[in-house]
Image (spheres, coloured by chain):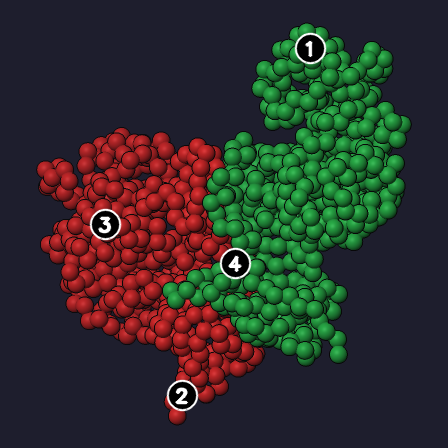
Chain colours: A green, B red
Amino acid sequence: MNIILLSGGSGKRLWPLSNETRSKQFLKLLKNDESQYESMVQRVYRQILEVVASPNVVIATGSSQVDAIRGQLGDKVDLVVEPERRDTFPAIMLSAAYLAFERGVPFDEPVLVLPVDPYADMGYFRLLRDMEEAVRSGFADMVLMGMTPTYPSEKYGYILPVLDISNDMNDIGMNGNDINDIGMNNDDINSRKANGKGIGKVGKFIEKPSVETARLLIERGALWNGGVFAFRLGYVMDIYARHMGYDTYQDVYEHYNEFKKTSFDYEVVEKAESVAVMPYSGTWKDMGTWNTITEEMGENYVGDVTVGEGIENTHIINELNIPIVALGTEGLIIAASPDGILVSDKAKSSYIKPYVDRLGDRPMYEELRWGEYKVLDYVSYDDGVNSLTKYLTVKAGKTISYRLHNDRDEVLTVVDGEGELLMEDSIRDVRRGDVVRVAKGQKHAIHAITDLHFIEVQIGGRLVEEDVEEFEVTTQ
Amino acid sequence: MNIILLSGGSGKRLWPLSNETRSKQFLKLLKNDESQYESMVQRVYRQILEVVASPNVVIATGSSQVDAIRGQLGDKVDLVVEPERRDTFPAIMLSAAYLAFERGVPFDEPVLVLPVDPYADMGYFRLLRDMEEAVRSGFADMVLMGMTPTYPSEKYGYILPVLDISNDMNDIGMNGNDINDIGMNNDDINSRKANGKGIGKVGKFIEKPSVETARLLIERGALWNGGVFAFRLGYVMDIYARHMGYDTYQDVYEHYNEFKKTSFDYEVVEKAESVAVMPYSGTWKDMGTWNTITEEMGENYVGDVTVGEGIENTHIINELNIPIVALGTEGLIIAASPDGILVSDKAKSSYIKPYVDRLGDRPMYEELRWGEYKVLDYVSYDDGVNSLTKYLTVKAGKTISYRLHNDRDEVLTVVDGEGELLMEDSIRDVRRGDVVRVAKGQKHAIHAITDLHFIEVQIGGRLVEEDVEEFEVTTQ
């Protein structure tokens, strides 16, 4: 099975646990059957493996998430890293080009596209196989998964199957022409009717209707668009060929900005002549707010948390290494990370974004390919010089690449583990208690032999992650 | 005016802002008339100066508070540092001995004793002069301040003046003999009656009565015991002489553990033959819980705090340098310091102590004579070795004394300021960017020329404040 997972979003709505580099899909808040914490990305990948032993998975993402994905899934998946954030149409086109040109996937093979972070039960993933089969059988060019609506939401796109089409469709903005456009015949409708939970041709897409319209749509059997698509690779590559003529992935990558900045739904799905939908009615949540996350959290309290005196319906996640004590709270989400502390009424937690947008953008915690760091302290002095203190962990066998900084000096104190330090072409061993001074402009790299932990004190004017020039290590 | 201020309490009920070394009286949460934050200690001392230009103030306290008092009040006050924590009787006896033997205060001079942290208006402090005058006039051996009760509390001691004494006093556990014991005559009673807000002789002390009894006591004019006493120094020194025969402060200090571990109320006040009380009915709070503190706080939000979406009756104090965002909370106190984070319903906040007692005892923040430090991070490794990272500030002109540590190595990185480092008898200048390694057993002292800020990384088995041996600096 060929699968394109779309991994996007800067995830400020789950601040302070999510930030620029750690989107919500990477938060390890769920528990698997073995009671180990896992993230949405890890859960989805595990669920895919339960229905297909050796899937061919490509994750389309931005460069800021590469380290987090590699850290959580390792090298088992291919990454298609968008040169810039555009929209789902360019991202899926680039991924399709990767499958076609780099992986040599035959054009008649089905491809499935889904978000990297749906919270769903196994029925969702088993349905991927049925969708693949529907594409293979030629039932439609494009097969969608339709989520059974649970309430007349204004925030979803609706998929209206061809069923019970009548004049009162005018109520929801369809007219006779629309109905003719659909191109359905009675056989299609009857086949759909004969199989309530089966596949049906799609009549129309309605994006974010009013509650009133949503109610009418649901009465007529409309489903939510969950962003899950299946199609033959060739079908999408034909569309690609109408946009671009290159036949290597590298060329497509380099001309990525020429793709129209639009959604795959709008540019491909809604223009397709033959679209079908398969309903899914199991658990499905988008885990986009603290409110939905807390409903599925493995534990009410994560980290160093003490509660007492009539606490009710409160979820607490503490990623700091100082204790949180909560007394007598009700209906709260409390979350603390090196980025900050949130205390919010659960129902109000979905309004967090504007408040968090005003805060500084510097991530105080990052999970990277080589390990992780957290910022312990940041201070500005009167003369415009600043100091920033970090705790870094480089995982055994991993390396922080050869680099220099233009605006800061660093002092590294190794507090645990063993490693090797490359400084301006000379290598030395470092271990607990060793101190390394790295001046502005001095090239350095660090390789961990065992897990290597050190405190880094930065002193300089501009203490940002972007102040780094990377170099290749040239072997003598 | 001779004043003994009693400064006690480890103050866990205001965790995480109070800890072993920073009791509640040192928290700068109040605002003075110039809109500057001040602590209870600073407020009380300022209020005393408003009624007496040059008071003779002695603060009786434990060694853990010495640095905080010196840091907040400077050298303007004398300190009587109890060799061990006992109770108010030994503390006041030691302070009286200090006044008598060290300061040479004549025995016929009045002395006032009060807590270091009452939250009261100026009437309270003006009343101290009236109490002093009452002692001087010989009206009674012991003059107390009686707080006008606002509700039938079970937690205070009650002072019942001699007034309207009748048989129904049996209701509150007094019998005919008690009444005779009081030793009042009609003149006393009439003088008291003639002056509603004046002085009256005391009939009886009732400690922590039931609500029912408290209600009866209040009906009969009883007042709360606010722990404010006035007496001639000689009166208390006579009692001292019945316990101990030494006539130097040093001797009394060295035999401090021979004083009975009991309260001054029980051992002296309740046994006095002639006790009077002067009522005070202005503002008076003991600021012992978050609930009372928040009522008087200068601002609802202190530190890096963002609030939004229908927040109500919420107080937030953030001493960390990461932001707190609060949405839709109601009736909460949120307080964050390097020691931890509290989120509590205000009414429930008085129940905090047992939960906080379970937490580790290591202070993560201390205000010291030479400046302050906060712990940024603490990590334990598999082999039993630990690392601890601190941010330290030594104030210009101050010195961290010559010392060594037995169980840890330290790496100091200066991030701002200039100072001098004494290491094993050699002195060198240190400034921003300098790194100093201090091995186990190596003697070192640091003197700040300008405010000196540095990051200290400790590595060792036992990383506690107690691991320090101090030395005198011997000049060549």
Q: Secondary structure at mark 3?
A: loop
Q: Are discs 4 and 2 less than 8 Å apart at CB?
A: no
Per the image, label 2 sits on a secondary structure element best described as loop
CA distance for labels 3 and 2: 47 Å
Q: Chain of mark 3?
A: B
Q: Residue at x 59, y 49 (%)?
A: A20
Q: CA distance from mark 3 to mark 4?
A: 36 Å
- Does residue A196 appear in this view? yes
Whether pointer 1 and pointer 3 mark residues with C-beta atoms closer than 8 Å, the reply is: no
Q: Where is mark 3, residue-wise? A: B33
| Label 1 element class | helix
Question: Could you say which is closer to the camera, residue B178 or residue B463?
Answer: B463
Amino acid type, label 3 = Asp
Secondary structure beneath label 4:
loop
Q: Earlier in the sequence, mark 3 or mark 4?
A: 3
**Badge 1: residue crowd in 10 Å (few <14, some 14–19, many ≥20):** few
* Numbered mark located on residue B474 in the image: 2
A357 sits left or right of A73 in the view: left
**Residue ID at (25%, 42%):** B283
Q: Residue A327 in the image: x percent, y percent? A: 51, 40
Asked whether disc 1 touches disc 4, contact meaning CB atoms under 8 Å apart, the reply is no
Q: Chain of mark 2?
A: B
Q: Amino acid at mark 2?
A: Thr
Whichever of callouts 4 and 2 sits on the residue coming sooner in the sequence is 4
The residue wearing badge 1 is A176
Picture quadrant of residue A398: bottom right
Q: Which residue is mark 4?
A: B361
Residue at image coords 83%, 40%: A2
The amino acid at mark 4 is Asp
- Going from the N terminus, do you reach mark 3 or mark 2 first? 3
